[in-house]
Amino acid sequence: MATPGPLQHAHHAPQYQDKGGIPKSKRKLQKHLRSAGLAYISRTGKLIPAKKVADELCQCPHKCDASVPLEARRRLFEHFYGLGEADLQNQFLRKHMDLRARLNAPTPPLTSSTPEGGGGSGRPPRRITCKYLVPLLPSEDTVEVCQKAFVSAFVITTKRE
Ligand SMILES: [Zn+2]
């Protein structure tokens, strides 16, 4: 007596369907490569070269370049791309951008006003300043740099795709 055995042994060779696009696994790899600062092929098929440590951070009068030694740049670079995930990297960047609204900046009195007045005429414009801090790894110290230097130090662009 033949018992109905498991005859359903379909030949299911794992086939990746290339339905006009990059397979999911590949896209994930791309994303990883990109986050890791390695070379990858962009969605448009362009080869994006691997990131490398910037030789020069900026050319501004503050000489940010001099405040971040090459060794610190390398460490920073390794750390940042070692994170390997865009989310973590964004977090890291945000931590080093000190965004603050300058509310109590001393403003010279333009007109003599009564001390108790508090009349709401001519409110000072709310100024937002952003400080860019580059960590001098492995220490906890940070050094303030201009935006250009910050962007160069992390080898990022201000444009977010
Ligand atoms: Zn600078």
Image (cartoon, rainbow, N blue to C red):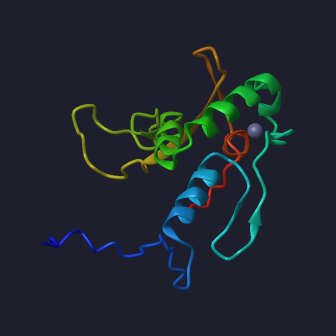
In the picture as drawn, the residue positioned furthest to the bottom comes out as 20
Q: Quadrant of the N terminus?
A: bottom left
Residue 124 image position (x, y, % from top left): 41, 47
Q: Is residue 53 left or right of residue 13?
A: right
In front here: 143 or 39?
39
Residue 94 image position (x, y, % from top left): 49, 40
Q: Quadrant of the C terminus?
A: bottom right
Quadrant hosting residue 136: top right
Q: Is residue 127 visible?
A: yes
Q: Is residue 161 visible?
A: no
Q: Is residue 160 left or right of residue 91?
A: right
Residue 97 image position (x, y, % from top left): 53, 38
Q: Is residue 39 left or right of residue 94?
A: right
Where 102 falls versus 11 (above or below)?
A: above
Where 153 falls versus 29 (above or below)?
A: above
Residue 80 image position (x, y, % from top left): 61, 36
**Quadrant containing ligand 1:** top right
In front here: 83 or 146?
83
